[in-house]
């Protein structure tokens, strides 16, 4: 039987890796010759989850091999986030929880996107719909994905469906939700071996806000003050990016996963927009504490876009 | 509660109208203030179904009114097939069975496409998933949509899921599937009041096949010879289109819904491609009988594309 590859987005996070593994497993149980793959390095948080549940990381690819015709995308649909040769393969399914953009097919397909906090929440439902039992290992991976995308159920992207799935899966996985979730997030929040360049680029995204170009980088931590011991070096890297890319604003977001706040550092010519967007004063270091702000997508991009486009 | 509009594609067919009505009904039962709408005239086949089950046609719109923010698309996703102001509204859901193309959103949504023969087949499943009873009227509309899209379960686009849904729905609707289906198709196949221009344009689509521009028009009938009494007038209309649009081929497909064959008429500079694609001889009138061919999408476009691009 021809092989179908299942993979998530570039710069893989825990939802993308765990959803690829879990959905390939479900397809196997349904008689499809599916294999999971990944498009980049496994981060520390994901590695913690894989090690805890004793599951191997899927194979690393950057393009779909010539002998594979059919692929399934999980946790993404935008072609620029996918494999380099996405236009040369047949996409037979998509399981996702993002907006739909820069995606098209020649033929009808199974496309399932739902506005929930995590792809794994949809997959948990699909196991049930197909009457396939979720094993302890798969439950652990799906749970890890939900914990990661929802910052332990505290992000505003988290829905009741995600919460219910997480509790259900924790029981099957045999772990205590709060303790396991915190341990996993802390494993990912270990930034001790990261250089200032890595901290600024490891999860950075650029956004168009009206005519303005805004870059927002985010890291998770349990101790923001530790990260800001490198403030001078971080600023140098950010200023270089502002000049080279012609950015109107660069915002570095250090999210405290224990307190669910973010301490941000602003550089570029429009740092007063940050004060306006979040109704805060920036201190003499161009930093500000944003109480209760953890989601780049739902809390930061939206607030800044409003200010830049009004 | 704000109103959500539910509608299908322009040049509405039976699946598009019936799916809009049925899905608005399901959303109502689930507590959403949804209303069905349509983007064009109701054709004879659809009118037969609406009359038979005593259901009113949904409201006619060409743009979403200013007081409506949220819309649900059924049976289509490509923006050029939708309302004129599709870019100004929020698409909260899509239920479809076509390829995905020229579609995007700013926010996550509920997007459900499945590679089945008819949108109504997916909706029948969604009633069950939500534990909502399908009434006699809704069953009649969903059944009519499946009969229409599958030419009474005989099109190669028809899947086992469509077949099972049709039998189940016929029972609830209280009709004999074969008899009702044939009566409805025959109502739609009444071409007696159509001018040659109408026959050629009422369901015509243009396709790019390699460098060639090919237009394919299709009508359903119970008597192809009756349609071809107008051969001279049909040719005149087709030749005009060939010249005005610079077509490489214009194929007129007259599909016999009783015998499940199509008699085609070819015009333009590449009529020999038709002979090659279907391994038939065209007669002195540039016509040929294509045995067992009923689906433009699955049987005609594919065969012609192969010949034009080899």
Image: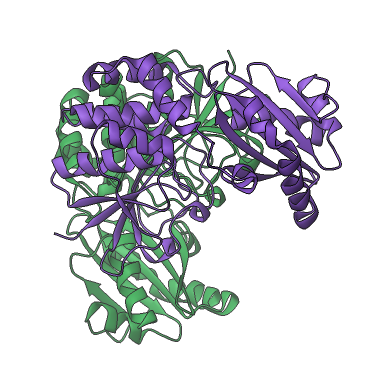
Chain colours: A green, B purple
Left or right, B74 with reference to A116? right
Using the image as rendered, state which of residue B165 and residue A203 is in the foreground.
B165
Determine whether, in the image, residue B6 is placed left or right of residue A99.
left
Using the image, determine if residue A252 lies above or below residue B300: below
The residue at 27%/23% (across/down) is A129
The image shows residue A102 at horizontal and vertical percentages of 53, 52
**Residue A164, quarter of the rendered image:** top left
Q: Is residue A17 visible?
A: no
Q: Position of residue A256 (x, y in %)?
A: 24, 59
Instruction: Residue A217 in the image: state x and y as whole percent.
Output: 41, 64
Task: Write the residue at 73% across / 36% down.
Answer: B231
Residue B293: image quadrant is top right
List x then y, in percent, for residue B136.
20, 26
Number of marks in the rendered image: 0
Q: Residue at x 43, y 63 (%)?
A: B87
In which quadrant is the N terminus of chain A drawn?
A: top right
**Residue B295, can we see it?**
yes
Task: State the quadrant of the C terminus of chain A.
Answer: bottom left
Q: Nearer the viewer, residue B203 or B54?
A: B54
Q: Is residue B191 above or below residue B244?
A: above
Which one is in front, A214 or A14? Answer: A214
Q: Which residue appears at 48% of the width and 29% of the height?
A: A58
- Between residue A77 and residue B225, name the one nearer to us: B225
Whether residue A54 sits left or right of residue B278 in the image: it is: left
Residue A246: image quadrant is bottom right
């Amino acid at each position: 039987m021809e092989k179908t590859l299942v993979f998530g987005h570039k710069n893989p996070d825990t939802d993308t890796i765990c959803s690829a593994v879990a959905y390939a497993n479900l397809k196997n149980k349904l008689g499809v010759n599916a294999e999971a793959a990944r498009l980049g390095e496994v981060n520390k948080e994901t590695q913690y989850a894989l090690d805890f549940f004793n599951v191997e990381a899927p194979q690393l690819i950057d393009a779909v091999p010539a002998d594979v015709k059919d692929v399934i995308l999980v946790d993404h649909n935008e072609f620029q986030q996918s494999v380099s040769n996405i236009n040369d393969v047949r996409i037979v399914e998509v399981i996702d929880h993002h907006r739909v953009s820069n995606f098209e097919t020649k033929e009808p397909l199974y496309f399932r996107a739902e506005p929930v906090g995590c792809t794994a929440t949809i997959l948990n439902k699909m196991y049930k719909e197909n009457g396939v039992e979720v094993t302890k290992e798969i439950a652990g991976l799906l749970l890890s994905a939900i914990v990661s995308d929802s910052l332990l159920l505290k992000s505003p992207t988290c829905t009741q469906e995600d919460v219910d799935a997480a509790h259900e899966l924790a029981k099957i996985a045999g772990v205590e939700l709060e303790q396991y979730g915190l341990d996993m997030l802390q494993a990912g929040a270990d930034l001790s071996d990261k250089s200032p360049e890595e901290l600024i680029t490891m999860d950075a995204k650029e956004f168009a806000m009206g005519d303005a170009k805004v870059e927002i980088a985010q890291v998770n931590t349990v101790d923001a003050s530790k990260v800001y011991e490198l403030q001078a070096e971080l600023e140098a890297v950010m200023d270089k990016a502002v000049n080279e890319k012609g950015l109107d604003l660069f915002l570095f977001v250090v999210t405290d996963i224990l307190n669910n706040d973010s301490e941000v550092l602003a550089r570029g010519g429009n740092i007063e927009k940050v004060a306006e967007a979040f109704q805060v004063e920036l201190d003499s270091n161009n930093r500000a504490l944003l109480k209760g702000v953890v989601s780049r997508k739902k809390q930061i991009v939206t607030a800044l876009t409003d200010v830049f486009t009004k």
